[in-house]
Image (tube, grey):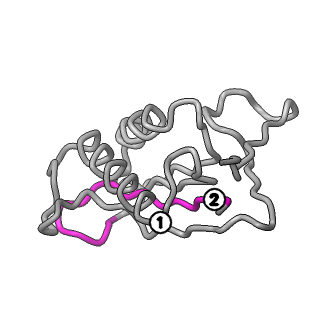
Amino acid sequence: MPKAVTLIRSAALSSVAEYAYAATAPAEARLIFLAGSCPLDADGATVAVGDVAGQAAACVANLRLALQAAGAGIPDVLSTRVLVASSAQADLVTAWDVVRDAFGDHDVPSTLMGVTVLGYDDQLVEIEAVAAVLD
C-alpha cells in the first residue's frame, strides 16, 4: 500500500530539531484525528505515577492501539503534540526522548509543551496526533 505521509525538511531552518518541519498528505488520504493518548491502563487507572518516561511509554503504547483501531500505524502519523505537566525542561526532554525513540526514522513534525496540569489524577504526559492513510 502506498504511503500517504511525506515529511518535508528545509535547509533554511536549523538542523538541531529532531523532526521534520512539515508533513503533507494527498487530497485522497483519509485523515485520522486522534484524541490525546493518556497513560491509562485498560481499567482507566493512571500508570507509572511520578515517572515521566514511563508515562510517555504508556502514551505511545495507547497511541499505537488507537492508530491500529483506525487502520493506521506510526508511519502514518503526520504530526504530534507532546504535553508534559511540568515546568522543568528536563522532564520535557525525558518525555520527548521516549516519543522520538518510538517513532524512529519517522521523525514527524512535533511540538513539545510544558503545561500546568493534565486531565487525569497523577497524569504527567499526553500525546496528540494526526495521521493519514490511503485506503
Query: In x, y percent, where is residue 80?
Result: 54, 54
Compared with residue 98, is residue 50 higher up or lower down, i.e. above or below?
below
Compared with residue 99, is residue 36 higher up or lower down, i.e. above or below?
below
Decide: marks 2, 1 in contact (CB < 8 A)? Answer: yes
**Element on which disc 2 rests:** strand
Q: Which residue: 49% across, 61% down?
A: 71
| Left or right of residue 123: residue 7 | right
| Residue identified by numbered label 1 | 70
Q: Which residue: 58% across, 30% down?
A: 105
Magenta span = 117-134
Q: Quadrant of residue 67?
A: bottom left
**Element on which disc 1 rests:** loop
Q: Is residue 128 magenta?
A: yes
| Residue identified by numbered label 2 | 133
Among the two numbered marks 2 and 1 on one chain, the one whose residue lies closer to the N terminus: 1
Q: Nearer the viewer, residue 91 or 66?
A: 66
Mark 2 → mark 1, Cα distance in angstroms: 9 Å
User: Which amino acid lies under the numbered mark 1 shown in the image of this protein?
Assistant: Ala
Q: Quadrant of residue 54?
A: top left
Q: Which residue: 16% across, 69% down?
A: 44
Q: Is residue 77 magenta?
A: no
Q: Which residue sits furthest right?
A: 12
